[in-house]
Image: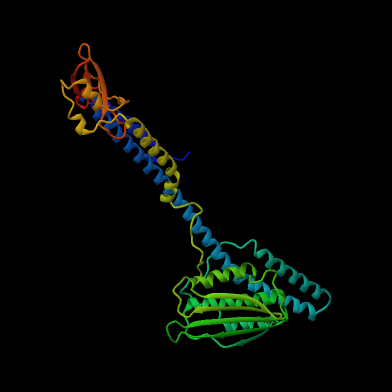
Amino acid sequence: MRTHPVLRWAVPAFLVVQAGVLGLAWWAGSGLLLALAELTALTGFGCLLLLGQYLLLRGRYAREREAARRAAERRRVADEVHDLVGHELSLIAMQAGLLELRVDGADAELAGQLRAQAERAVASLHDTVALLHGTARDEPVTDDIEDLVARARQAGALVTLHGDVDRVAVPARLAVHAIVREGLTNAARHASGSPVAVVLSGSAGAPGDVVEARVATSGAPAPAEAGHGGHGIDALRRRVAALGGSLEVRHDDATHVLAASVPAQPTGDPLGSAELVEPVGTRPLRALVRQTAVPVAVACAAVVGFWTWASHDTTAEPEVIARFAVGLPTAELDALVPERQALVRLARSPEPPPGSTCRAYTDGNFPLAAASVEVCADGDAVTRVTNLAAEPLW
């Protein structure tokens, strides 16, 4: 079991303190001092245990948070690899399909094998994305959107481009580039040969401007689940949300539409995720409260319950104790004292006077309600009043 160094030293430290408390009590001979010292020692020991447990939970929380951060980084990089490599493989598969239709014989068979291998690579990519580093936020994209559309046309896609994005920040341009690339990739995979319209609008001419990108694929089959498009769409949705934008996927009249709106000057991380990097476990202070709330509540309830029981009908008020005096008639004493004697004694009382009976009462001290005064009386009057707080333990 993993323990914090503070916890390993807690018990020896408590034993040392206990030895000091007992030695002090022996030297002073005071039951009240012993009770206070014991209470202080137990409180300190409890605080030491809580501190050690908190440090242990904080270390575990830090490890979980680091693991969550690394997992989020792996997901982010996997999203980038999926977008970049998946798009290229889709184009290869499309080109191989066109080549298969234009040639015959062994060349057609070879083109078919190439197309099949590219399609299998695209499928495997979704399950085996490696941990690679993505494009930094201050780096330009490797090619602009016009080149992206041109390469898709060369692969046989029927793509039209309308509009452009002008003077936008690099993070916004990266996001728009990824949106167009994802739309063209999905069109190549699911609706090869269908017309695709890419519409861009917006610029960074004024604060608050947004960039809008829309990729519409005609004749595309409806997705299995409305509003979702697999790993690539989920990654785009997180990416756009991290920049403060929005992304929509819909299917209208046999036309698959991927539309997004992104701030022209975003402040977020273009490759980041909108998901919070939080560990599975709870925060250390909250976890400590959860772990100790019930035991502490039970202990407090037990202490209060014992004190309530021990002080009930055994407590003499200070003004009553002040009236205890030698010679006080027994009849008046019986009218003043509580019904029961104190249950806890921390001091050794002297021998009672001959023919006298002694009874001890508490002043209600917390948490033990220990006896604080002893009254001895014979059949007629009080013979002795003893302040037990000043008496030795033994």
Q: Which x, y percent locates residue 231?
A: 62, 67
Query: Which quadrant of the structure image shows residue 83?
Result: bottom right
Query: Which quadrant of the structure image shows residue 302?
Result: top left
Left or right relative to 246: residue 97: right
Q: How many marks?
A: 0
Which quarter of the figure is the C terminus placed in? Answer: top left
Left or right relative to 131: residue 56: left
Q: Is residue 34 above or below residue 174?
A: above
Q: Residue furthest top?
A: 354
Q: Which x, y percent locates residue 59?
A: 43, 48
Residue drawn at point x = 52 percent, y = 71 percent: 241
Q: Which x, y percent locates residue 382?
A: 19, 20
Q: Residue furthest right?
A: 105
Residue 212 appears in the figure = yes
Q: Is residue 227 above or below residue 303?
A: below
Residue drawn at point x = 56 percent, y = 71 percent: 237
Q: Which x, y percent locates residue 199?
A: 59, 85
Left or right relative to 123: residue 314: left
Closer-to-camera residue (368/143): 368
Closer-to-camera residue (21/387): 387
Residue 142 appears in the figure = no
